[in-house]
Amino acid sequence: MLLKTPLLSVYSLFKILVYLLFTMFGFASCMQLGNFEKNIEIKKHEWQSSFEPEVEFAITDTVSPYNVFVVLRHTDAYAYKNIWLYISTQQPGDSSFKKERFELTLQQPDGTWIGTGLNDVWEIRHPLFTNIRFIKKGTYHIRLQQAMRDEPLLHVMNAGIRIEKVNN
């Protein structure tokens, strides 16, 4: 009877280790999907046009397609149905940014917010580029700048970028 107890403990320990290994492999496989997201906090929820959140990310796979999203988090006290942004991109090896103006619609015509909401906080992920292939390996930079007339632009909490590898 005393011999069965240690064997049972070893067997239980073995089951736990196998479970932990499968869990670790599961997390590792999720990380290899190619998803990346970085959101930068807008202090006091007051976005000055001089503040340009910048996201930096490395690309090693130039064969797979990616989707790139602008991510914006705001409160329901935000005063407008949209936001105009300047989006500046820089490829590896380039010394300058390419800057473009971009309108992000935040409300439906009936006034309901677009995106996901929890209480008074709303988040929208809007496609910036779909099914693109990065042509160079290396570090890319994307800057976001608010281009609205208000200075500062109130009730914007975070701005960022999300990148997802497209699964074919």
Image (cartoon, rainbow, N blue to C red):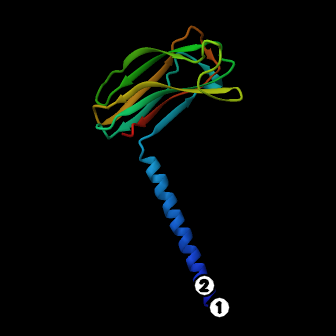
Q: In which quarter of the image is residue 119?
A: top right
Residue type indicated by callout 2: Pro
The residue nearer to you, when weighing 142 against 20, is: 20
Residue at 70% in and 26% down = 120
Does 80 appear above or below 163? Answer: above
Residue drawn at x 68%, y 21% as measured from the top left: 76
Residue 14: percent from left, percent from top: 53, 73
* Residue type pointed to by label 1: Leu
Q: Which mark is residue 116?
A: none
Residue 30 shown left or right of residue 91 in the figure: right
The secondary element bearing badge 2 is classed as helix
Q: Which of the 4 image quarters holds residue 43?
A: top right
Position of 113 compared to 139: left or right? right
Q: Do the residues labelled 2 and 1 touch (CB within 8 Å)?
A: yes
Looking at the picture, how far across and down is residue 83, in whole percent? Answer: 55, 15
Give the number of the disc on residue 6.
Answer: 2
Q: Position of residue 93 (x, y in %)?
A: 28, 29
Label 2: few (<14), some (14–19) or many (≥20) C-alpha neighbours in 10 Å: few
Task: Return the residue nearer the eye: 156 or 27.
Answer: 27
Circle on res. 2: 1
Query: What residue is drawn where x is 53% and y is 64%?
Result: 19
Locate the N terminus and report the quarter of the image it occupies: bottom right
Task: Give how far apart the Cα atoms at labels 2 and 1 are.
Answer: 8 Å
